[in-house]
Amino acid sequence: MGKADDTTSTSSMRLKQEISLLHGVCLIVGNMIGSGIFVSPKGVLLHTGSFGLSLVIWAIGGIFSVFGALCYAELGTTIRKSGASYAYILESFGGFLAFIRLWTSLIIVEPACQAVIALTFSTYLVQPFYPHCTAPYVAVRLIAALIIALLTFVNCMKVKWGAILQVVSTVAKVLALIVIIIAGIVVLAEGKMENFNDSFKGSNLNPGDMALALYAALYSYSGWDTLNFITEEIKNPERNLPLSIAISMPIVTVIYLLTNVAYYSVMDMQTVLNSEAVAVTFADSVLGFARWLIPLSVAISCYGGLNSSIIAASRLFFVGSREGHLPNFLSMIHVKRYTPIPALLFNGGMSLLFVCERDVFTLINYFSFNYWLFIGLSIGSLIYLRITAPEMPRPVKLSLFFPIVYCLCSVFLVVVPLYSDFLNSLVGILVALSGVPFYFICVYLPPSSRPAFLGEMLDTFSLYTQKLCFCCVADQDLDLDNPPEGEKAE
């Protein structure tokens, strides 16, 4: 690159602080409310055995998420780096654990999560055509694969194409939930309360099942760490980050509880458990000719959520590659469009593998083990830094009660499923352990001590990647969202 280009790239090193309190609240609410609330109610009810206990689990999930979000408010204002848990683990515990966190995201967490969203999208799109039976397995999987491929292609072509889509997606999911909640209130106002009589009958208090029910509920609450990925872009983060969390979390918790009450007011337990698309079954029961509104809104919502997840995952891998934790071909960008095509293609390919899984709740259990392990570890970094670096400036300082309780609950979420869902938990453990030799060989060892064939293989692969994708390794200081104006693609 020439001197002028270097100057332009350097100007993007500091991100503009453009996210206000209102924007922060909207970002958290918009990211938390996604496909989860349309798929998780069945999983929560399956493992709790009663309406009453399932609502308790939803409330606990909300409180647990508030604790985590408050801890992240302190971490986000203490460690002023974007990247959330990856940045906090890297800062506190060093490169090894940060690499394993990145590795599990690369191999299982991000692609499995995207597969769940894609399958929810396709199920809600197809199920209305099969009102009295389960939608065909092949049709649902093909459509899920097509939507992953389409959005991967869209993001390879141009990053900004998704902006309008995100607005439409947010409107769609809020509209769907408002319709469901209002319909539920109308049903309850008519005095149809029989589903709530003796609502705790048949409750399953087995700790393992409780943990799996929390997995399903907490999948819907994921997204509360949204602002911590972009801490550097928040105006007055010491004030706006914790306030955004304090405002948005109760809003989402109340919406989720009201939505589940609406579901349960219309459908009995067996109907919920037999439904492949709970909101579609609900709409068929109460909305009459307007029932098409729900599956369409949910599909649009999932489409937008999947788009966001694909962008976020590709950026995580892109950043990890620039940190030296992943092969450098993942930090390559298209020379004109400034899109991380290799990272997008790798992420899309991994997601397609997980789409083949028959049960979405198995997918949730696959990635939940590693997800909550490293979220708990990142919250543990708060306690660690209080002990090892008490002099660090902390604009937001919580009582240690919050991180300690959160870490204990994370231990419960990680350890208990080892007994109740050993095989899926074993998958998570093996994925994490598989990253150890890769770290030792590819990161820990100096380049001169690494196997020569490995370097030659990666160099050859990187060369072909550059040629096939018309890519080059990005400048270390380049901001993908604000590429040099003079070099943007026409």
Image: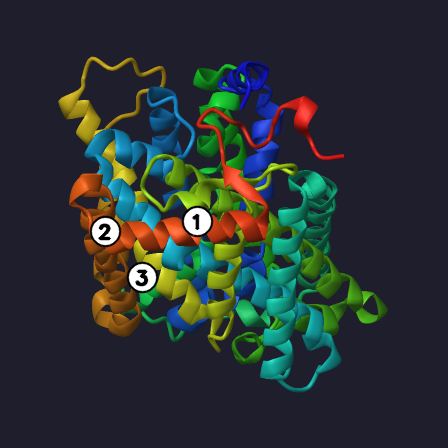
Element on which disc 2 rests = helix
Residue 445 is situated, as x and y percent measured from the top left of the image, at: 17, 42
The image's mark for residue 462 is 1
Q: Distance from label 1 to label 3 (Cα)?
A: 43 Å
Quick check: can you spot residue 254?
no
Q: Amino acid at mark 2?
A: Ala
Q: Distance from label 2 to label 1 (Cα)?
A: 15 Å
Whichever of labels 3 and 2 marks the residue nearer the N terminus, that label is: 3
Residue 218 is situated, as x and y percent measured from the top left of the image, at: 42, 53
From the viewer's perspective, tell me whether residue 342 is left or right of residue 445: right
Please tell me whether residue 453 is drawn above or below residue 317 in the rendered image.
below
Whichever of labels 1 and 3 marks the residue nearer the N terminus, that label is: 3
Q: Amino acid at mark 3?
A: Ala
Q: Nearer the viewer, residue 398 or 168?
A: 168
Name the residue tied to disc 2: 452
Q: Nearer the viewer, residue 417 or 449?
A: 449
Dividing the picture into quarters, in which one does residue 44 lie?
A: bottom left
Name the residue tied to disc 3: 211
Residue 221 is situated, as x and y percent measured from the top left of the image, at: 47, 49
Please tell me whether residue 448 is drawn above or below residue 385 in the rendered image.
below
Element on which disc 3 rests = helix
Q: Distance from label 3 to label 2 (Cα)?
A: 46 Å
Camera-side mark, 2 or 1? 2
Whichever of labels 2 and 1 marks the residue nearer the N terminus, that label is: 2
Which residue occupies 35% across, 45% down? Answer: 326
Which residue occupies 74% across, 79% down? Answer: 129
Question: Would you call the spot at circle 2 few (<14 residues within 10 Å), some (14-19), or many (20 or more)?
Answer: few
